[in-house]
Image (spheres, rainbow, N blue to C red):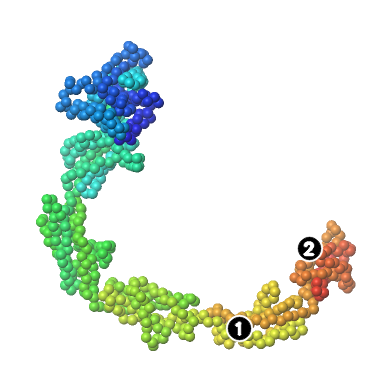
Amino acid sequence: MLRYLSLITSIICIHGFAISQNNSTFPVISHITKDSAFIKWVPKDIQMFNSILENGVRVTISAENDRTDFTNGQKIDLEPVVKKWDKWDLSNEKLDRIHEIQLGIKTAMSHDKKAQDYAFTIASLESSLSFEMNLLSDLMIGIPRPKGGQPFAVKVEIKGYDPVIQIIENKTSKLAEVPKLTGKVDRKKTATISWNADSVVSEYLGFQIERKVDNGKFEKILVSPFVNFKTNTEKTDRLASYRDEKLQQGKTYTYKIYGINYFGIKGQYSNEVKIYLPKLVNAIVNIDTVQSKGYDREIMVSISKDVDSLPLLVNRLVLMRSDSLLTNYSVVEERFLKPNETKVQFKTTSLLPSGDRNYFKVFAFSPDNDTAYSTPYYYFTLDQEPPAAISNLKGIIDSLGHVTLTWTKPKDNDLLGYRVYRANLKTEEFVERTTSLQLNTLFLDTLNLNTLTNEIYYFAVAVDKNYNNSPNSDTVLVVKPDTIPPSEPFLISLRKVGIQIDMEWQNSTSKDVEKSYLLRKTDSKTDTVLVWKGDEFSHFRDSTFTFSKDVSYSILAIDQSNNQTSSKSRSLFIEPGFRAALSNVKASPNRSTKAVDLSWMKPQTEVFQYFIYRKKSEGSFHLIATVSSADVPAMKYTDKTVSISNEYEYLIQYQSQDGFRSLKHEAVKVRY
């Protein structure tokens, strides 16, 4: 309620009515009709409301041609409410209610602020929702509308408070449209209407609801107008709603509302909403018995009243069936009832003479499609017929020993699951691998691949809901993948012959070896020297190494399943007495410096010095320079002792730190 008061005050402020920051002032608002002007003042607290009731109010209308002249204006003194009791006929409900409001305010004045706020809220709310109560409680006056349409001013004086002067524009006030009204049936017995009261909160304080039944007349259904109260926790966009209960089934109720503004003046009507209250079925439905006769199933159903004082409104029954308790029900038969018929027999045909399992449920419908339904009734017959054998059993196994079996299910509709059996030999006893019955047509198994046998056998059977087992499926053979590496080859001998390394070996004796590789390992890398199949090679001489180092050899054998094994490596220390020739040696003429530029790639060996040789045309090579490695860090040298129109060839050797010279590379030619 306190939110309601703050809401009224904020709305008045928003719309520009007279109110200052001084706590002794108060809002003054107006409503202009074709012939009248209504002026209202809004008490700000219980003390101001009490002062109005006990002392009355003086209202002065400004002079006709001067809005600032109140001396010559019309003065209207409203007699205090408390002095009117003897003159009033208190049998009038509104007069009696004002008396109660005044006594309530008077009593609250002697209590705490909470009681005062409550009394003030009730008094403000009730006096604002009624045009007559606004006038009777000295909160409003009505005067003839000044002619000419010119603005005028009013001064409102309340004892104990500063006077408030408000300019009245003298323009006819427009009543806002009421928001769209919507309606629905709630819980089958209640009509709920809703509208967006917040969208017109600045125009309408309350709403009155009118209703008519079928083709009757509209009548008010609220003693007091509806006010859209909200708590602090409610969303601001929540629709206002009203629930109309204790309605009659089978009747159509039409609703419309109109707003009541802060002067208690009736606003426009909303649209009309029709709500039909359906005829409820009022029935208890039971499946009494289910009997089996061959393929036929006979279901006996009884109907009784749910509430004895209400009629039994059932005009049809629908029998439904499912293989699950809660879902997948389908319609079996629909039956329209005769008047007062309460016993019904349904007949349906089973897909199986025995072994069927079904849940039955019966729905009762009223003429308006309201429903009541029975509890599910479970019925089964003992199945003695095994399902057909499964087909297309297939199996595969991966390199980790994971077996995947798949098959095609039989056409039986009452399967419970499958059993899978396994054996190492087709002639030995098969052992079940499944631990529970599942309807998946896929089964996963795990095998140990490191066994002597590489074959495994499976078959499967189907099991129905009465635990009848089908004939065995065909037996399927699953071949294990080869995970055993081939036997180990070994090197028989390893020796240096001249500048070559001669070796012999024994190949792997495994029959499934696909390829063998001779591998050479040095400090920097491992090279494949030779590749062969079977026993194609068992002897080889290697001449592709380059200079002194430890060299080790091994043989790698790989079988058809990509399993591999390697021989023990054998090492040999070789010192050939020379180093590898330089690589990527280049020579190019440089016209700008009148020289030949030489470059090469740095060798892997630590170099002490380089020897540069040159020959001219058909001449012989001779040494033209000896340079230390420190002088050519970029592996470049410039020959400035050349002459034009000659062809030169160059050779470059190096000497390692341990005193060995490199082999000579192929001479490079350049024409200068």
> Can the viewer see residue 375 in this picture?
yes
Name the residue that disc number 2 marks. 634
| The image quarter in which residue 12 lies | top left
Q: Is residue 251 above or below residue 497?
A: above
Q: CA distance from mark 2 to mark 1?
A: 46 Å
Per the rendering, the mark at residue 475 is none
Q: Where does the image place residue 161, in percent across and percent down from the top left?
A: 34, 21
Which structural element holds mark 1?
Answer: loop
Quadrant where the C terminus sits is: bottom right
161 on left or right of 186: right
Q: Amino acid at mark 2?
A: Ala
Residue underneath mark 1? 533
Q: Residue at x 32, y 77 (%)?
A: 462
Q: Looking at the image, which is closer to me, 571 or 179? A: 571
Which badge, 2 or 1, comes first in the chain's sequence? 1
Label 2 secondary element: loop
Indicate left or right for 53 with 598 as reference: left
From the top left corner, tell me how far across and down residue 516 is, in percent. 61, 82
Residue at the image point whose x is 36% and y is 71% from the top: 440
* Image coordinates for residue 285, horizontal then vertical, percent: 17, 59
Tell me the mark number nearer the camera, choosing from 2 and 1.
2
Which residue of the protein is positioned furthest toward the top in this rendering? 72
97 to 512, vertically: above or below: above
- The residue type indicated by label 1 comes to Lys
Q: In front: 390, or 104?
A: 104
Q: How many marks?
A: 2
What residue is at 86 percent from the left and 60 percent from the top? 594
Horizontally, residue 22 falls left or right of residue 316, namely: right
